[in-house]
Image (tube, rainbow, N blue to C red):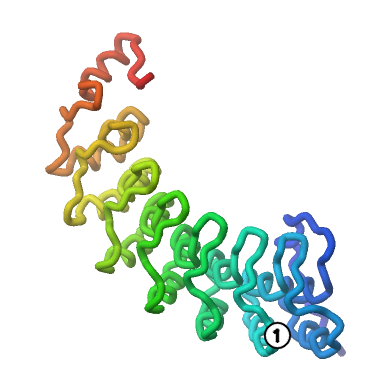
Amino acid sequence: MMKHRRLNFDNFASYETGFPFSGLHYASFFGIGGLVAALIKMECCDINEEDFWGHTPLAWAARNGHEEVVKILLKREEISPNRPTTWDQTPLSLAAENGRKGVVKILLSREEVDPEMPDNGGQTPLMCAACNGHEEVVKMMLKREEVDPDKPANGGQTPLSSAAKYGYEGVVKILLRLDEVNPHKPDNAGRTPVEYAALGGHKKVIKILLDCEGADPDKLETWDATLLWNAAVGGDEEAAKILLKHHEVNPDEPDDDGRTLLSHAASRRNGGDATRA
């Protein structure tokens, strides 16, 4: 008796479907290896055909972690393993973004796969993995010599600042072990990794970054205020406590208007506006 495979439609239901979306796209999305192989043998479909989102069958298989389907598709000579989607995401970046370790390993074994190819926001596969906290994928990407661990996206954010922003302590530690990574590199708006960690209230990441050589917790950050000022005025009590414990933090450091935290607190208590115009 043939055993029927139960398909999970939960992921698929969140997408707006439309044409073209071929049978090969469906089979690749759900990881039905036998059907993928059969459709390819029939030679009735374009293996590199893009759907309504610009996804090829390989892109869907990579995104959803279907290793068997990825292997089947990559055996075809006409396959384009770097074919980008509408947002310039490659199968590798989609796999990295979703933590598909097996697929990442398969794709990185192919010489024609570019591990540094950015999407339309300038995010490389490494950054896609870093900003989603996929530690094992980050390690795999860093083994490639051509991968720049400090490469910024279009907005100037690095893999480190992206990981710090979302509080991924493990990824932050991995990246900080590399000499090429600048722990204080600002983005285009002037925000450093520690500021991103402070804005997110990620206590452990704040501590790690403040312990890096050259850290200046009293440096004026975005809006010309210190990390402590931003944490206190933003109501992040835990982040403020961590900063106050740091021996280099001066609680009396003024902002660019010459006002200290104490003066802001007094202004707020008296009904004044503690924030800047």
Residue at the left extreme, as displayed: 247
Q: Which residue is mark 1?
A: 78
In this orientation, which residue lies closer to the viewer: 115 or 104? 115
Give left or right: position of 17 versus 253.
right
Give left or right: position of 173 versus 30.
left
13 in relation to 78, above or below: above
Secondary structure of residue under mark 1? loop
Res. 172 image quadrant: bottom left
Q: Residue 10 at what x, y percent from top left?
A: 73, 61
- Kindly identify the residue that appears in the image at 33 percent across and 19 percent down: 274
The three-letter code of the residue at mark 1 reads Glu
- Kindly identify the residue that appears in the image at 84 percent across and 86 percent down: 43
- Kindly identify the residue that appears in the image at 30 percent across and 40 percent down: 239
Give left or right: position of 169 versus 77.
left
- Kindly identify the residue that appears in the image at 17 percent across and 52 percent down: 214
How many numbered discs, if any? Answer: 1
Give left or right: position of 120 versus 217.
right
Q: Residue 6 at what x, y percent from top left?
A: 78, 74
227 in relation to 4, above or below: above
Q: Residue 260 at what x, y percent from top left?
A: 21, 23
Can residue 203 be seen?
no
In this orientation, which residue lies closer to the viewer: 128 or 82? 82
Rendered-image quadrant of the N terminus: bottom right
166 in relation to 46, above or below: above
Can residue 57 be seen?
yes
